[in-house]
Image (spheres, helix red, strand yellow):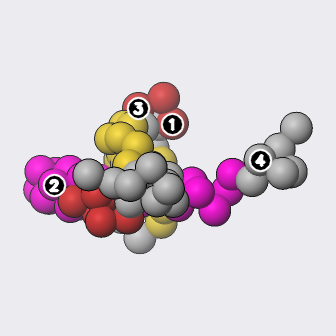
Amino acid sequence: MADAHDAQLLHLVIGGEMRHPAEPVFRDLSQVEFVGAYGSYDEAKQAWKARAQATVDNAHMRYFILHAHKLIDPRTDA
């Protein structure tokens, strides 16, 4: 169990079907799958790997780990 003072590093896992396997452009943004939000990179990687392996037969499916903790700064967010 994490200590109350441990830093929470928010990671989001999302994915969906790409227009082309070589380009990170979603075919339909309304169909993007939110896999989950995780407090560490390791947890996010486990979720990403499980989801990616479940869709391995579709070459157009891609999943990504977003380092949301790098995008959120309460000192600058209005």
Q: Which mark is drawn over residue 9?
A: none
Residue bearing mark 2: 50
Q: Are marks 1 and 3 in contact (CB under 8 Å)?
A: yes
Q: Which mark is drawn over residue 29?
A: 1
Tag 2: amino acid: Ala
Q: Which mark is drawn over residue 74?
A: 4
Tell me what residue is drawn at x 50 percent, y 56 percent: 5
Percent x, y for residue 76?
A: 86, 51
Q: Which residues are magenta?
A: 47-72
The CA span between labels 2 and 3 is 19 Å
Sequence-first disc among 4 and 1: 1
For residue 64, which quarter of the picture? bottom left
Q: Total of numbered circles in the picture?
A: 4
Q: Residues within 10 Å of mark 3 (few under 14, many from 20)?
A: few
Q: Are marks 2 and 4 in contact (CB under 8 Å)?
A: no
Percent x, y for residue 52?
A: 21, 57
Sequence-first disc among 3 and 4: 3
Residue bearing mark 3: 31
Tag 4: amino acid: Pro
The CA span between labels 2 and 4 is 32 Å
Q: Is residue 70 visible in the rendered structure shown here?
A: yes
